[in-house]
Image (cartoon, helix red, strand yellow):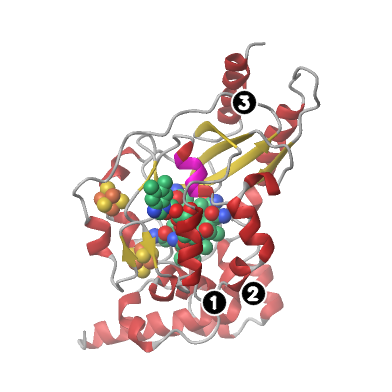
Amino acid sequence: MTPSETKQQIIEQALRLGFNDCRFTTAEPPASSDVFLRWLAEGCHAGMRWMESERSIRGRLDPRKTLPDAKTVICLAASYYLTGPQNTSVARYARVADYHETLQTPLRQLCAFIENIEAPNSHVAAVFASDSSHLLERDLAQRAGLGFIGKHNNLISPKLGNWFFLSEIITTLELEPDPPLDIQCGSCDRCLRACPTGALRERHLDARRCLSYLTIEHRGDIPSEFHAAMGNRFFGCDRCLEACPWNRFARPSTMPPMELDDRLFSAELLESLDNAAFKQRFAGTAFLRAKRDGLLRNLLITEKNQKRTTDGHG
Ligand code: B12
Ligand code: SF4
Ligand code: SF4
């Protein structure tokens, strides 16, 4: 099999497994390592202390720390765009079942497929990664030409818009890298104007001001200066992503929608659940990440916001 036939086979298998796109890059260090280190030094990671660990930094600066002898990173996109009626007060990514779980099986299957490819004089190894891995996923994906990095920080694909997850397979198999896309945002600044807290600068996000961070990752109180900006959104934010005109290219997700009773999203109901009951009711969803106390904290704020609106105070 020629290397380009091998690539084609991998792409076809990835699409069969439910991914929406698949592109290839080398396992060389990402070009924007300095951007990442500066971001950390400025404290823009807020309370996400796990990003400061030596392992996290070393991995992000070089994919070969995740798999020694790696030659190729295969970058994959999985759309989470759902059509039809949905709960719009939660971020879109939480409206499908937790991708950390659902993407495991297709990623594992794709790794097995790649490890079975016959390569001259060597055994092929492949490992998969997504989100919690120590990789600068967006940088690698833009280098592979899976999309370009928008001013709102997210990867935008001309085939999918911005509603998709990233995953990677790192492998010792040597394959021809794909070229990056020659597309940029141009003079558009809709996402920057849509952000209600001033968390965004062009391709730079300060998590200390981002409602996505504050409502999901942050532990403890949310500073009162951000309460009004939350409006009715009690899990994530998405306003910068919603503003992006590239979303006219969004394609429906093949991932399972989250199956949860919306009546659970009330402070009163949540207060009646202890941690164990919370874990059980929210199993398999992204909401577990905020934990019971975080979700309850958020609901108390958004319910107060709604009451204010109803009472005519804002
Ligand atoms: C920490 C984290 C967060 C934090 C901080 C976000 C941030 N911007 O860093 C918080 C909690 C706020 C967050 C929110 C969200 N996240 Co998040 N997050 C991550 C995580 C775990 C690490 C990101 C990271 O390393 N940040 C450090 C900064 C410095 O790196 P970066 O954001 O990747 O930015 C790079 C580029 O912008 C590039 N760059 C900047 N300027 C330039 C210039 C040039 C020339 C080049 C080449 C590159 C370049 O350099 C940076 C460093 O490499 C990744 C998974 C991963 N392992 O990568 C997911 C990830 C980025 N998140 C993702 C998602 C889906 C989201 C949310 C939409 C979910 C939600 N609704 O809550 C929001 C979107 C908010 C937003 N506008 O970005 C997806 C993004 C998919 C995509 N299409 O881009 C990822 C990749 C997870 C995944 N596997 O799918 N996230
Ligand atoms: S998710 Fe919301 S708060 Fe965070 S950068 Fe985007 S618009 Fe701003
Ligand atoms: S809204 Fe405009 S500026 Fe922002 S990411 Fe999309 S195209 Fe780029």
Q: Is 261 placed above or below 154 here?
A: below
Please give the residue where the numbered disc 2 appears in the rendered image.
278
Task: Answer with mark 2 or mark 1, whichever residue precedes in sequence.
Answer: 1
In the displayed structure, 60 sits above or below 261; it is above
Q: Nearer the viewer, mark 1 or mark 3?
A: 1
Dot 2 crowding, Cα within 10 Å, few <14, some 14–19, many 20+: some
State which region is magenta: 138-142
Q: Indicate the position of residue 105 as horizontal and vertical percent values.
A: 69, 42
Residue 50 in view here: yes
- Mark number, residue 47: 1
Question: Nearer the N terminus, badge 3 or badge 2?
Answer: 3
In the image, what residue type sits under mark 1?
A: Gly
Q: Is residue 274 left or right of residue 224?
A: right
Q: CA distance from mark 2 to mark 1?
A: 23 Å
The reply to whether the magenta stretch includes residue 255 is no
Residue 71: mark:
none
Q: Residue at x 45, y 36 (%)?
A: 146
The percent coordinates of residue 249 (x first, y second) are: 33, 38
User: Do labels 2 and 1 touch, CB within 8 Å?
Assistant: no
Tell me the element at label 2.
helix
Label 3 crowd (10 A; few <14 / some 14-19 / many >=20): some
User: Could you tell me what secondary structure mostly forms the magenta stretch?
Assistant: helix
Amino acid on which disc 3 is placed = Gln
Q: Is mark 2 within 8 Å of ligand 1?
A: no
* Residue under pointer 3: 13
In which quadrant of the rendered view does residue 287 lie? bottom right
